[in-house]
Image (tube, rainbow, N blue to C red):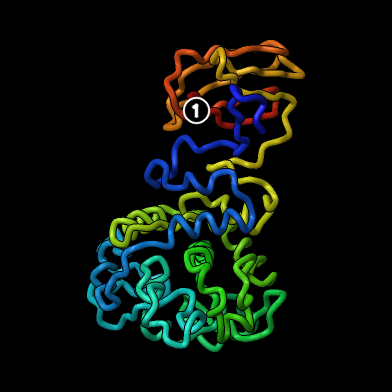
Amino acid sequence: MNLSRRTISIYFFGLYTLLFAQAPAGYYNTAVGKKDAELKTALHTIIKDHTMLEYYSSSTSFQKTDWHPDGYFWDMYSNNKRTRWSGMNREHNLPKSWWSTNPETTIAYTDLHNLYPSDATANTAKSNYPLGVVGGTPTFSNGVVKVGSNSYPGYSGTVFEPANEYKGDFARDYMYVVTCYEDYANNWRSLGTASMLYNGVTYPVFRPYAVNLLLEWSRNDPVSDKEINRNNAVYELQGNRNPFIDFPSLTEYIWGKYKGESWPGDDSQPETDATFYWSYNAADKTLFVKVNQPETTTYSIYSISGVLLKTADQINSNSKIEVSTLDKGMYIVKFYSGTKRKTGKFVVN
């Protein structure tokens, strides 16, 4: 909203993250302030372009991405501790048959974010079954993963169930795939569309059954050091990241309890409605602030890179904050009033 020719509007995008978890500074800039489908598409644009690796080189890449600190391939499909590739497969967590009749021709086929070392026997048993919770007697179980009839509400069929300690890993992987390859919407097929995915739909893309399952798994199994280290290693090899590892709250803003709220750029909860308003005036280089409860209000101004530049313990109900010493550029302002918080950006020209 332009207040005048000489007034620069402020953008209420929520909190721009000051410290991106493991990602380079600015990596997720264009997703800040987005919500729901728009947020998912913004993430798609950020991560879709990456290096297409050679499929059979992944066993060598796994020595960087999936090498256990104790010196063996970190296999989420079995308890085997193999130091050599013998007896292992390259497994797509989200089955490759779900996105194409000829998946080998797609960049997704070699994407290390969805490609893992796995015990060959467990891989065969997994087939292209959807994720779920096995009830009754499994048709396959090796003490780590199971295959059998689904007992989770919403889908009746055979499913693959990983170990509890890796369920969040699988959930965040599936969310990554449908986001990175949002442009595959018309290609979803096979058991995928019979169980977890809508064909031709970019949002929410997951059926209600899948949304409930993946949100539950991501909440119950938070991001581990294993995932963080792997995300960093894959980024070095192919040049993109899994945003749901960097910021687990994204799952909630896109599919979960924060739907309808703008993502603030960090893992904080949505802001409450605040009782203050502000705008930047270019004529005298001041930030005008109106506050309903000034006795409890403080503010801080940061550079776009997160450096604290100015702060005060209290401001009046109608205040002008002097910012004439700031260079040209974009800045972050944060106001705190009791338990309420409001953040945004302003531009100095």
Q: Residue furthest right?
A: 292
Residue 238, given in percent of the width and then of the height, sits at 31, 62
Picture quadrant where residue 232 is located: bottom left
> Relative to the observer, which residue lies in front, 73 or 263?
263
Residue 24, given in percent of the width and then of the height, sits at 37, 45
Q: Disc 1 on helix, strand or loop?
A: strand
* Residue drawn at point x = 35 percent, y = 62 percent: 50
Q: Does residue 156 sit above or below 253 in this rendering? A: below
Q: Is residue 202 left or right of residue 124?
A: right
Give the total number of marks visible in the rendering.
1
Which residue matches tag 1?
331
Picture quadrant where residue 312 is located: top right
* Residue drawn at point x = 53 percent, y = 48 percent: 31
Residue 166, given in percent of the width and then of the height, sits at 48, 65
* Residue drawn at point x = 63 percent, y = 65 percent: 203
> Relative to the observer, which residue lies in front, 307 or 21?
307
Picture quadrant where residue 8 is located: top right
Q: Amino acid at mark 1?
A: Tyr
Instruction: Sort mark 1 into few (<14), some (14-19) or many (20+) by Cα contacts within 10 Å.
Output: many
Q: Does residue 19 sit above or below 328 in this rendering? A: below
Q: Is residue 246 visible?
A: yes
